[in-house]
Image (tube, helix red, strand yellow):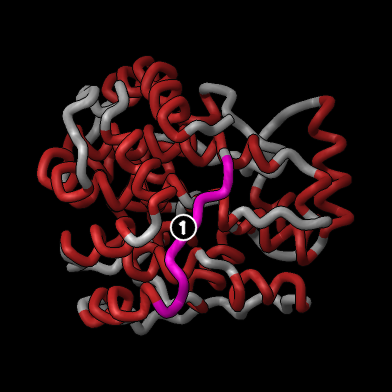
Amino acid sequence: MPAIPVPTATQTATATTKASRSAMPRSPRESPAAPAMPPAARSIIRTSPIPRILSALCAPGVDAATVAGIVGQEPGLTARVLRVANSAYYGRPREIATLDRAIVVLGLDAVRGIAAAACLDRGLLRSPATAAVDMDAVLRHSVTAAAAAESLGRLRHRTLAGEAFIAALLHDFGVVVQLHLAVDPMVVRATELRTTPRAIHPAEEREQVGTSHADCVAVVFEAWQLPAALVDAVRHHHEPANAPEAARPVTALVHLGDLLALRLESCHAFEVAPGEPDAALDLLGLTAEELDAVGAALPERVAELRTALGGP
């Protein structure tokens, strides 16, 4: 999908400050040591436009006026949000003409999720390190996992569906950091898996790269001062039971969304096997039959969303 303009630091300063006032306090948990990042990787933290928009979009308690202000400052982002809002994905063709109307009809969480999806590719930075692999496959997998997590959330945990969409959308952002930390072994792995696609085991990932993509993304998100619940969800999305108790439902939704994306063969060269769904299903009060039903409807849902986003 083409790059989307995002608000400048000056434009979003007021909105971001307002949103951050209501942000959840950091939990006093012990964070793993950050991997040693070379300058190219540290630039992701310093210069990416993603933290400015995500810190405002993801802040707990963010209000409709703040979200509308952030999105409305850039015509390109506004157009993308309205296109998705009027797409078959939400079943409301040509009914929504303004951001305010989109928030009223679809809900604030849905609009936040659309905005995050619309600017996702701005975070998956193109560079010599990422040029060697298929980053569009990472985008496709992320969108598929997000649609699945949102659909599962609507079954039993409707208030978490929007949060699950955003967390699942961003759960593999750590792959970008890994590519800057250890590009040679990552490219070797991508080459090997191109002939025999498979999801690798977490221990294999750590052996090859030195750290997991989940820990990498958590380190970056903490540096961006994103909400603790989002950091926990991406850090523990392969092992939801290890997440702090308050974050386990969203983390379990991301875990199951990841699993359904792999079942659809929406996989990229660095995907880690998500394991079995039973524990996450029990945590959420879902059944295997409900998981299968969401999986059966997912191809059409993902096609609608990717068409609306204009992505690969």
To which residue does mark 1 refer?
Answer: 234
x and y percent of residue 225 in the render? 42, 77
Please report the bounds of the magenta region as a residue range.
2-10
**Residue drawn 74% across and 50% down?**
204
Main SS of the magenta segment? loop
Question: Quick one: quadrant of the C terminus?
Answer: top right
Looking at the picture, tell me which residue is in the foreground, 25 or 125: 125
Task: Using the image, determine if residue 182 lies above or below residue 80.
Answer: below
Answer with left or right where residue 87 lies relative to residue 34.
Answer: left
Task: Using the image, determine if residue 40 lies above or below residue 309.
Answer: below
Does residue 44 appear anywhere in the picture? yes
x and y percent of residue 39 in the render? 76, 78
Does residue 159 appear anywhere in the picture? no
Question: Quick one: quadrant of the N terminus?
Answer: top right
Task: Using the image, determine if residue 57 lies above or below residue 285.
Answer: below
**Residue drawn 81% across and 51% down?**
186
Q: Amino acid at mark 1?
A: Val
